Amino acid sequence: MTLVGGIDSSTQSVKIVVRDAETGALVREARAPHPDGTEVHPQHWVDALDAVTSGILDGVEAMSIAGQQHGMVALDEAGEVVRPALLWNDTRSAPDALDLIDELGGPQAWADAVGSVPVAAFTVTKARWMARVEPENAARTSRMMLPHDYLTWTLAGRPDVAATDRGEVSGTGYWSPATGEYRDDLLRLALGSVPAVPRVAAPGEEVGRTATGIALGPGTGDNMGAALGIGAIPGDVVVSLGTSGTAFAVSTTPARDASGFVAGFADATGHFLPLVCTLNAARVLTAMAELLGVDFDEFAELALAAEPGSGGLTLLPYLDGERTPNLPDARGSMHGITRSNLTRPNLARAAIEGMFGGLADAVDALVAVGVQPRRILLVGGAAANPAVGAVAATMFPAPIVVPPPGEYVADGAARQAAWVLTGGGEPPTWSQARPGESVTFEPDPRPAIREAYELARVALHGG
């Protein structure tokens, strides 16, 4: 049996799966936590990776890392970290995003240049923030990487030239998915200089080896890893419920959305991955469950006991600000409260409906750039909750498919590692990757729920 490893280095933790390279069968897995926060020293990721891989890589011949997107890792001439990495969920660079948009000539100019309009999450805005607030650190920066780039580079022995992949680098704001080239002018616009950046490896290319001889794939971003792990094809829209919420689809053409809703990313296979991201997803549900004093199973029972529409309650779930729509300083709010509808079941269901309100808008935005949803694949830890799939069926116009639970980001990285071993062609098709049956919820749209959500959003934050 040939073994491959896939690593998901996410905001909250690092997970590894070891799988049979031919069939995808799971052999073993492990995880370790990451520190909380919106900036983290990269050494914490290295330490967690060392902990999770200790003793688990015996016999592994190749591995890849899929990591949280956008985070800025700034290094000096010696390759040492200049400052803690700013993560995707750090919103301090929101005003810098607005400045950069204006300086290039508006949203359409950015959409044409790199397929996306900058928001606080993007690396390019964090570079501008550092240049504005910490000019001495900006001056020291001679290399710039993304989180998974840094980990791959470290595992490879810190070679002179680091490597990344087109999926991960498409979230920087200074690389064009349409042309496949860096936009040094945009990096200079943001930082005031052009530090060394990783070369963009081909999909499935070996980019180095560990000290023990394990081949390393180029890795990718977490959403691109999930798409590869779940085997998404055109017509599939993946709605992922993690720390953030994302809706994305595999496309054969690049997206250029000047509205800023859709980020025109690349995927990990040579195609494209138009994506919409919200800041608030599964943690909306955990926050409400804690408020109600119940575990997740009891939370589901409460939510399913309420009628669709939650008796008129509507939650705007901007608990950590919001990315789409771009409202970094927004706060959550509950609308339509009466004495009769302020019940525990209605509060539970309103939390799920509120979480899906922004994600349903996200799917509409994907449709507007040409995506034609055949089905909605609902993934992430919260997707296993039976109330979540049932409520999703009232919010989306296509069938909701909940695949068997799995670490899809890590699985995608493992599938890429197996691809590296084949030496080219297409990524392997795995027959034993996820035992178990998918659960399907037929669409049961309730337009009144989305109308109430839209009225609440417009009333509070404008159109």
Image (cartoon, rainbow, N blue to C red):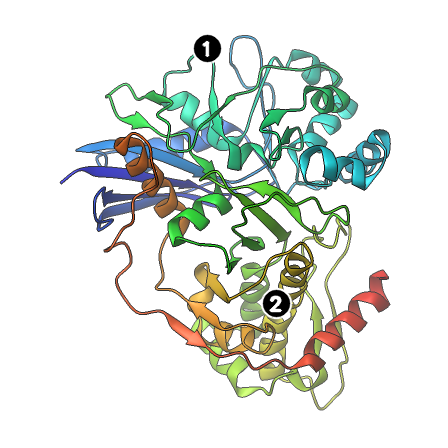
Task: Estimate the x, y position of residue 76 in percent, counting from the top left.
Answer: 58, 12
412, 76: nearer the viewer: 412
Crowd tier of the residue under label 2, counting other residues whose Cα lies within 10 Å: few below 14, some 14–19, many 20 or above: many
Q: Determine whether 126 is above or below 356 in the image.
A: above
182, 194: nearer the viewer: 182
Crowd tier of the residue under label 1, counting other residues whose Cα lies within 10 Å: few below 14, some 14–19, many 20 or above: few
Local SS, label 2: helix
The answer to which quarter of the image holds residue 139 is: top right
Residue placed at 82% from the left, 30% from the top?
104
331, 213: nearer the viewer: 213
Viewport quadrant of the C terminus:
bottom right
Q: Earlier in the sequence, mark 2 or mark 1?
A: 1
Asked if residue 153 shows in the view, the reply is yes
Task: Estimate the x, y position of residue 160 in percent, counting from the top left.
Answer: 46, 10
Asked if residue 93 shows in the view, the reply is no
Q: Which residue is mark 2?
A: 356
Viewport quadrant of the N terminus:
top left
Residue placed at 74% from the left, 55% from the top?
325
Q: Which mark is residue 160?
A: 1
